[in-house]
Each structure stands twice: as C-alpha cells, then as structure tokens.
Amino acid sequence: MPDSWLLSLGGGVLIGLAAGGLYFLAGEIAGVTGIVRRAFIGPERVWRVAFLGGMAAAALAWLLTGNVGAATAGLHDLSLWTLIGAGLLVGVGTDLGNGCTSGHGVCGLSRLSPRSLAAVMVFMAVAVLTVWIIRHAGAA
Amino acid sequence: MRTLVAFLAGLTFGFGLLVSGMSSPDKVLAFLDLAGAWDPSLAFVMGGAVLSATPLFWLARRRQRPLAGETYDQPDTRLVAKRLIGGAGLFGIGWGVAGICPGPAVVDLVLAPAATIPFVAAMIAGILVSARLRSR
C-alpha cells in the first residue's frame, strides 16, 4: 500500500474521530458549510466559531512544519475567476443542498442517512463529470 | 465545555484534512479525474472517516442526551428534495472546477491566504445570499 494511501487513511480516521466525537460529546454535526453559515448568522455561534478556530489552529501548527507546498499543491494554479466562480457555486450549492463533503459525506454516511447518500452520489458524479469535461472532452 | 469540545474537534478535523491531502486541489482533482492518472487516495480519506465516525454516531444513538449539550441534532434523513439534489449538483460543479470544498477552504485560508481569499469570500457570499433567499 503506497504511503499516500496510508496518510489518507490516517487523515480520514482523524476526520471521522473529530466528526464522531463532536456528535457524541456535543450532539452537533460537523458539517463545515452549516458551521460557517451559522458562525455568521447564528444561532449558537460560539461553538461554531471555536470549531473553525480549531481548524485554523491546526493549519497554523502545520505552517510550522514548513510542509505548505505539498499541502496546498495546485492552489496557486487556479485563476482568480476560477476561484471566485467555484467559490460561488460551492457556497450556493452546499447551502441549497444542506451540506458538503463533511456534513453529507462523513456525518451523513456515518448516520446511514439516505438523503446524505443521495447528495454524496450526486455531487461526486457531477464533480467527476466536470473534471472530465474540463480535462478530456476537448481532446476527444 | 461545548466550546472546548468544538475547538478540539475542529483541531483534529483540520489536522485530518492536512494529513490526508484534502487541502491540495491537485490531490482532490486527481481523485476526481477517473479518466486521467487516477489517484484513489481520497477514497481512503472518506473510508477512514466513515469507519471511525460510525461507531461514535452509533454510541450516541444509545444515549438520551450528549455530555456537553442539550440534545442530539437530528437532521432530516428521509426527505430527498429537488433542492437537495440541485444544490448537490451545483456544489459538484464548483468542486470539480477548483478541487476545493468548504473544509479544506478553511485550512487553505490559513496556509495560503492570498490564493484562498477569493474562493472563501465567494463561498461565504454564496452561502449567505442563498440562505437569505431561502428564508424569504
């Protein structure tokens, strides 16, 4: 098994412990879209801001490792308009769809929610298709 | 107590995103690119996460209330609305275009603020405008 698979598995286990732990201990869903939205407009902003602060603290600690290039590989290749357009689509889409990769993906699948399974299948399929169109359709 | 739990959960979540490679658009797009040089790593992220979260969600189901909270949040699990599918589709397009979803956007914002600010600002604007229109 390649190292990158093991790292991904290990990172995934951490994500799952965080999401499962937040639910077990505090009764809250670790869905980043919902957390961001309610960190701005409430209700119960305090724990949500703390969760985002924890994420930021992890990234700050990561800065000390100096391994930023690999962690953000590809980020600097994106044009300003790509970033803005994709950000808008992600924002509107996850709000209308009630969740993203963390809320529907990690939490929803772990709760065996059929609704989340439907959402995950749709956004995965559409994302795969989008990448295919961008990278391969022109050359076909 | 809730604040501390949330902070530690966010910290662990953030490290998980960084260790797993989810914070890199290249890595995410390589996973989504089935027809290219496919990199299956991110399937292990989701697999590992669901594997470790499922028992905790199951344990929570056996309790009346959480240790640091009043109730267990119970999002609707059954209703598959058009809005849900349409929203997931829009999100899928945005994710496929840039390879960034909301969690990684938060850690990338700290690692590479200049490159990430346009994405995060647009994402937050999208979330808030959509939420405003929904509530009318």
Image (cartoon, coloured by chain):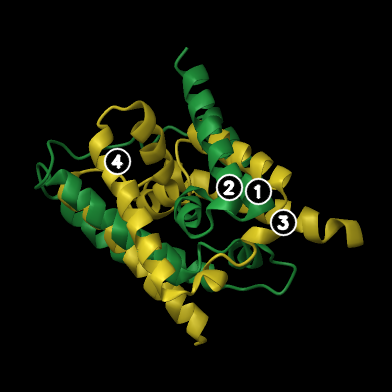
Q: Can residue B45 be seen from the camera position used here? A: yes
Disc nearer the start of the sequence (3/4): 4
- Give x and y (percent) for residue B131: 47, 24
Given residues B118 and A112, the one toward you in this image is: B118
| CB within 8 Å, label 2 to label 4 | no
Total number of numbered labels? 4
Q: Residues within 10 Å of mark 3 (few under 14, many from 20)?
A: many
Give the chain of mark 2. A
Instruction: Give the labeled residue for mark 2.
Output: A123
| CB within 8 Å, label 1 to label 2 | yes
Q: Residues within 10 Å of mark 2 (few under 14, many from 20)?
A: many
Between marks 3 and 2, how big is the CA–CA gap? 12 Å
> Would you say A94 lies left or right of A132 here?
left
Between marks 3 and 1, how big is the CA–CA gap? 9 Å
Residue shown at 32%/36% (left/top)?
Answer: B75
Q: Which chain is green?
A: B
Disc nearer the start of the sequence (4/1): 4
Residue shown at 35%/62% (left/top)?
Answer: A58
Q: How crowded is mark 1: few (under 14 residues within 10 Å), some or many (20 or more)?
A: many
Residues tagged by mark 3 and mark 2 found on one chain of the structure: yes
Given residues B71 and A65, the one toward you in this image is: A65
Q: Can residue B48 be seen from the camera position used here? A: no
Between marks 4 and 1, how big is the CA–CA gap? 29 Å
Q: What secondary structure is marked by label 1? A: helix
Disc nearer the start of the sequence (3/1): 1
Q: For chain A, give the colour.
A: yellow
Instruction: Give the labeled residue for mark 3.
Output: A131
